Amino acid sequence: MPVLVPLNLALSGVLVFKYHRDVNWPQLRTRILPFTALGLPIGLAAFVFVPGRPVKIAFGVIVLLLATLQLGQLWRSRRMRSSLALSDSTTGRARPWTLIESCLYLVAGGIMQGLYASGGPFVVYYSSRAIADKSAFRSTLCVLWLILNSVVCITLVCTGKITFETLRTAALLLPAVLLGMILGDRLHSRISEQAFRVGVYLLLALSGASLIFRN
């Protein structure tokens, strides 16, 4: 995590600077940021005190489960496009979540953000239902990661986990991250909303499976 956080800050910062006009500020201010911020201190405390391997396996299981559920939702919505049962069958969104449902997922995302600097599965799962446009989806989450990971970075510096060696490793990886960002940015403008969401959840499923089998 001490390597990942500085890289994530660089990536999010560039994308926020470039696409800040696409941010869904109402969603970010009223739901996503407040609730994830509630879970962040819990995740940071767990990162310091909880053994890593069991938590990594649990995280992998959760990521794989959420990704599979959402892929199933997208597949069902594709088969039922002609039905009025879905509120937005073209994007695979179902009914809006209640405040309690939103709170549970976003607080869990904050916990995972503090624990792994990757609250993505929970927050992405919520945001994919709340934000239809893929550009707004991306920009809104980039602002969130920039804010939360700034807090995480300060915590890691204060606890001595970010060192010269971790920064050196991050610097070595930075060109690959920037290359991936450029390629992803170009691809983002060329794919449909449906293909974008399928790609997001396939990557989440693969990353969850990887965590499980590597640990």
Image (spheres, grey):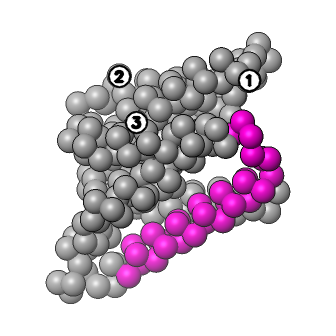
Q: Residue at x 25, y 43 (%)?
A: 30
Secondary structure beneath dot 3 equals helix
Could one spot residue 116 in this view of the protein? no
Task: In the displayed orientation, state which residue is furthest to the left.
Answer: 84
Q: Which residues are magenta?
A: 47-76
Q: Amino acid type of disc 1?
A: Lys
Q: Overall secondary structure of the magenta stretch?
A: helix
Any magenta on residue 160? Answer: no
Q: Position of residue 175 (x, y in %)?
A: 63, 24
* CA distance separating discs 3 and 2: 13 Å
Q: Amino acid type of disc 3?
A: Leu
Q: Is residue 5 above or below residue 203?
A: above
Q: Is residue 107 above or below residue 44?
A: below
Q: Which residue is mark 2?
A: 17
Q: Which residue is mark 1?
A: 161
Q: Position of residue 117 (x, y in %)?
A: 59, 38
- Kindly report which numbered mark, 3 or 2, lies closer to the viewer in this rendering: 3
In this rendered view, identify the residue nearer to me: 80 or 98.
98
Q: Is residue 61 left or right of residue 76?
A: right
Q: Amino acid type of disc 2?
A: Phe
Q: Which numbered disc covers residue 144?
A: 3
Q: Is residue 50 above or below residue 60?
A: above
Q: Residue at x 33, y 78 (%)?
A: 77
* CA distance separating discs 1 and 2: 28 Å
